[in-house]
Image (cartoon, rainbow, N blue to C red):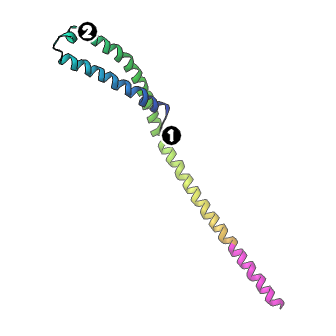
Amino acid sequence: MSDRSFNNSMMLFVAIPLVVCWLAFACYVIYRGVNDDSGFIQDNLDFYVALIAIIGGPALLFINSILEAWKAEQAAQQNALPQRLEIELQQALARHKHNLDMSAAKQQHEQLLEDRAQQHQHRSHEDE
């Protein structure tokens, strides 16, 4: 079973980088605002807050939908796990029984061949 599903790929290549970029930009604005001696960031703080909201709003919706799909997929995999384990156990038991049956059949066949060989030798000695 592949661990690289579509939802896992979406989380890895879209959602996580998007969150990291959004957080990095928000932290950058906060850092620049705290260390701004000129007052430019503080004067334009509404612009930066709006920019963070514009980037963060759609990103949040997108990430939320991806996260919900990912959680549903993970739950489905976990729910299927007991059934898969039961099937694997049944397959192992059937394989073991088949191997035992084949070994018994082989042993019975070898015993039959030995019995016939002994009968053939016994008849050959009687004919002499």
Q: Which residue is mark 1?
A: 2
Residue furthest to the bottom in view is: 128
Q: Is residue 88 above or below residue 73?
A: below
Q: Is residue 13 above or below residue 86?
A: above
For mark 2, give the secondary structure: helix
Q: CA distance from mark 2 to mark 1?
A: 46 Å
Magenta span: predominant SS is: helix
Q: Amino acid at mark 2?
A: Asp
Residue furthest to the left in view is: 37
Judge left or right: residue 60 versus residue 39: right
Q: Which residue is mark 2?
A: 46
Image quadrant where residue 23 sits: top left
Magenta residues (range): 110-128
- Alpha-carbon neighbours of circle 1 within 10 Å: few (<14), some, or many (≥20)? few
Residue 122: within the magenta? yes
Provide residue 45's location: percent of width, then percent of height. Answer: 23, 11
Provide residue 53's location: percent of width, then percent of height. Answer: 32, 14
User: Of 123 and 16, which appears nearest the observer?
Assistant: 16
Q: Nearer the viewer, mark 2 or mark 1?
A: 2
